[in-house]
C-alpha cells in the first residue's frame, strides 16, 4: 500500500486526497488536495456548500508522529458558499475549525494531560506549553457543553503557573465528580466571570449572587501576592442544583 493511500485511509478522507508525501529532515510533509469536484462542507454549520468561492493560503496541521517522524498536513482550505452561512471557510475532516493540530493529536494530548503535567505532555508530543493549554481548554469546553445538564454543586478553583509565576491559568474542578471542568487564561475576576458565562449561569438569579460574591472574595485575596493553594481550593457555598447548574 502506498503511504499516500495509508494516510488517506487513516484520516478518513472522502472529499480530499493525499497528493504527495515528502520527507523534510525528521518531518513528513503530507500534501492534501481537494478530490475532484466533491462538495466541501461549511465550517460553520457543517452542511455541504453549494460551490467553492475561493482558495485560501496554505495551512499546516501537526498530526501524531509515526515511528518518531513528525507528520505535518499541508492544505489550502477553500471558502465555500453555504446556503445558510454565506461564504465561509470549509470544514476539514481531520481537525476542528481554527485548530493547528489534528483531532487525533488533540485527543492523545488531552488523555495524557489528565495524568501528566502540561510541560511533560508538551515535551512528549513536541508541542509548546501554550499549545497543550489550548488543546486542553478546547477539550474542556467541549466536555462542558456536553454536560450542561449535570448540576455542579461543589467547585474547586485553583491556579496553575508557569515559569515561576509569570503566567497563570485559572482551573475549575467539579469536586463532587473529581474532574476538571474549565480552564481560563489569567487569574482575575474577569477570568472567573468567563467560566460562569460559559456555564450559562444567569447572573441575577438567586444563588448566582452567592457564587459571584465568593468569586469576588477569591479574587480580592489572590493577586498580587502569590496565594496559598488552600486559599483557592475550597467548595463554593452549596445551593439547590438548579441555582448553580447551567442553563
Ligand atoms: Zn453553513
Image: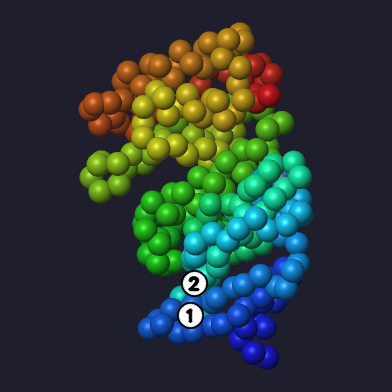
* Residue located at (62% from left, 63% from top): 94
* Residue located at (59% from left, 73% from top): 32
The one nearer the camera, 178 or 105, is: 105
Label 1 with label 2: CB-CB less than 8 Å: yes
Which residue in the structure is indicated by mark 1? 28
Task: Give the image quadrant in which the ligand numbered 1 is located.
Answer: top right
* Rendered image quadrant of residue 26: bottom left
Q: Tag 1: Cα neighbours inside 10 Å, few (<14), some, or many (≥20)?
A: some
* Residue located at (47% from left, 39% from top): 183
* Mark closer to the chain start, 1 or 2: 1
* Mark 2 residue's CB less than 8 Å from ligand 1: no
Image quarter (top left, top right, bottom left or bottom right) of the C terminus: top right
Observer able to see residue 63: no
* 12 versus 24 height, above or below: above
In the rendered structure, the answer to whether residue 132 lies left or right of residue 227 reads right
Q: What label sits on residue 72 in the rendered view?
A: 2
Image quarter (top left, top right, bottom left or bottom right) of the N terminus: bottom right
Q: Tag 2: Cα neighbours inside 10 Å, few (<14), some, or many (≥20)?
A: many
In the rendered structure, the answer to whether residue 122 lies left or right of residue 146 reads left
Residue 31 percent location from the top left of the image = 55, 76
* Mark 1 residue's CB less than 8 Å from ligand 1: no
* 205 versus 137 height, above or below: above
Q: What label sits on residue 11 in the rendered view?
A: none
Residue 119 percent location from the top left of the image = 36, 57
Residue 189 percent location from the top left of the image = 39, 23
The one nearer the camera, 8 or 242, is: 8
* Residue located at (44% from left, 20% from top): 215
* Rendered image quadrant of residue 3: bottom right
Amino acid at each position: 500500500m502506498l503511504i499516500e493511500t495509508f494516510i488517506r485511509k487513516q484520516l478518513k478522507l472522502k472529499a480530499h486526497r493525499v497528493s504527495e508525501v515528502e520527507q523534510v529532515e525528521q518531518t513528513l510533509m503530507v500534501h492534501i488536495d481537494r478530490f475532484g469536484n466533491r462538495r466541501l462542507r461549511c465550517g460553520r454549520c457543517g452542511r455541504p456548500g453549494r460551490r467553492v468561492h475561493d482558495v485560501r493560503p496554505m495551512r499546516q496541521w501537526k498530526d501524531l508522529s509515526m515511528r518518531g517522524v513528525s507528520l505535518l498536513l499541508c492544505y489550502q482550505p477553500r471558502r465555500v458558499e453555504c446556503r445558510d452561512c454565506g461564504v465561509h471557510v470549509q470544514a476539514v475532516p481531520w481537525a476542528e475549525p481554527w485548530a493547528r493540530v489534528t483531532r487525533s493529536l488533540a485527543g492523545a494530548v488531552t488523555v495524557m494531560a489528565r495524568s501528566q503535567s502540561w510541560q511533560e505532555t508538551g515535551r512528549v508530543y513536541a508541542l509548546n506549553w501554550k499549545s497543550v493549554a489550548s488543546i486542553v481548554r478546547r477539550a474542556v469546553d467541549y466536555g462542558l457543553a456536553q454536560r450542561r445538564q449535570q448540576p455542579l454543586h461543589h467547585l474547586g478553583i485553583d491556579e496553575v503557573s508557569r515559569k515561576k509565576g509569570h503566567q497563570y491559568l485559572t482551573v475549575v474542578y467539579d469536586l463532587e465528580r473529581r474532574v476538571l471542568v474549565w480552564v481560563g487564561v489569567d487569574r482575575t475576576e474577569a477570568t472567573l466571570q468567563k467560566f460562569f458565562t460559559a456555564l450559562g449561569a444567569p447572573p441575577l438569579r438567586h444563588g448566582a449572587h452567592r457564587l459571584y460574591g465568593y468569586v469576588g472574595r477569591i479574587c480580592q485575596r489572590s493577586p498580587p501576592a502569590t496565594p496559598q493553594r488552600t486559599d483557592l481550593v475550597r467548595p463554593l457555598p452549596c445551593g439547590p442544583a438548579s441555582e448553580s447548574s447551567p442553563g
